[in-house]
Amino acid sequence: MRVVGLTGGIASGKSTVSNLFKSHGVPVVDADVVARNVLKKGTGGWRKVVAAFGDEILLASGEVDRPKLGQIVFNDPDKRQLLNRLLAPYISTGISMEVFKLWMRGCKIIVLDVPLLFEVKMDKWTKPIIVVWVDPETQLRRLMTRDGTTVEEAKSRINSQMSLNLKRTKADIVIDNSGSPEDLNRLFKEVLVRVRKPLTWTEFGLSRDGALVAFVSILFGVIVCWKSL
């Protein structure tokens, strides 16, 4: 099984690339979706976060006010690290369960869409690693347009993340999304060809089909040895 790592930065276009994979039939495990699920009222992640940040982060329904929590952690690196540390075990478990479900369905290629791929060391389990990159000026302009933020607010949010220039040095594949949507589609198609190339023997061995082949081979070997006794 090939587990592809997909990451980027805020307003880099990572979600657009993730949706392109989905539209081409490649299953995607979205860490943001998993994170939303582990913060639902009554879950272990919810209890940990409420205990750490207080009831003031809750809506009247008891659910976490995600925008309010986001504002708190974006402006305080220590609280951001605390939140990541609290939720990391739950998110990792959730991602692993989603990958296992896809493995059971026989999927040979899976994309892990993880904003903090490098920060939580999940890059160790993915190959190739794709980083969606944009130049700083484009990233700032797109974020301000998308969220209606001021320059200072946008810069603060961008600076709260690992820089895209650093992420690109850790990537196997870089998608430069500084151009037009047409440019992105063209680059994506080139990347899709690379992602869909035949599995290596190691990747095949990690797939469900590979496990079945290994099981049958071992069973056949046992039968042959038994008959030769």
Image (spheres, grey):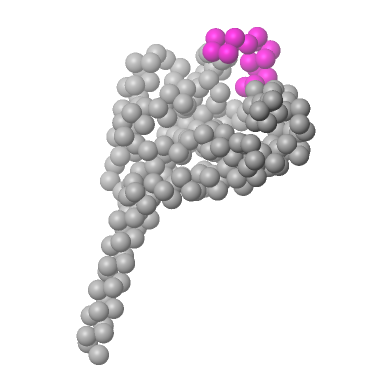
Along the line of sight, which residue is nearer the eye, 201 or 15? 15
Could you say which quadrant of the image residue 196 lies in? top left
Residue 175 spot, x, y in % from top left: 42, 27
Q: Quadrant of residue 65?
A: top right
The residue lying furthest to the front in this view is 61
Location of residue 6 with respect to 155 vertically, above or below: below
* For residue 72, above or below residue 144: below
User: Residue 143: horizontal and vertical position, in percent?
Assistant: 56, 15
88 horizontally vs 26: left or right: right
Q: Nearer the viewer, residue 202 or 94?
A: 94
Residue 140 in the image: above or below residue 86: above
Lateral position of residue 108 relative to residue 74, left or right? left
Q: Position of residue 87 (x, y in %)?
A: 64, 41
Whether residue 145 appears in this view of the structure is yes
Q: Which residues are magenta?
A: 144-158
Identity of the residue drawn at 58% across and 13% down: 147
Q: Position of residue 88 (x, y in %)?
A: 62, 43
Say if the magenta span includes residue 145. Answer: yes
Q: Residue at x 69, y 25 (%)?
A: 60
> Dominant secondary structure of the magenta stretch?
helix
16, 126: nearer the viewer = 16
| Quadrant location, the C terminus | bottom left
When asked about the image quadrant of residue 119, the answer is top right
Q: Residue at x 36, y 17 (%)?
A: 183
Nearer the observer, 128 or 55:
55
All told, the count of numbered labels is 0
What residue sits 22% from the left and 85% below the top? Answer: 227
- In the rendered structure, does residue 87 fall within the stretch colored magenta? no
Q: Determine if residue 176 is in view.
A: no
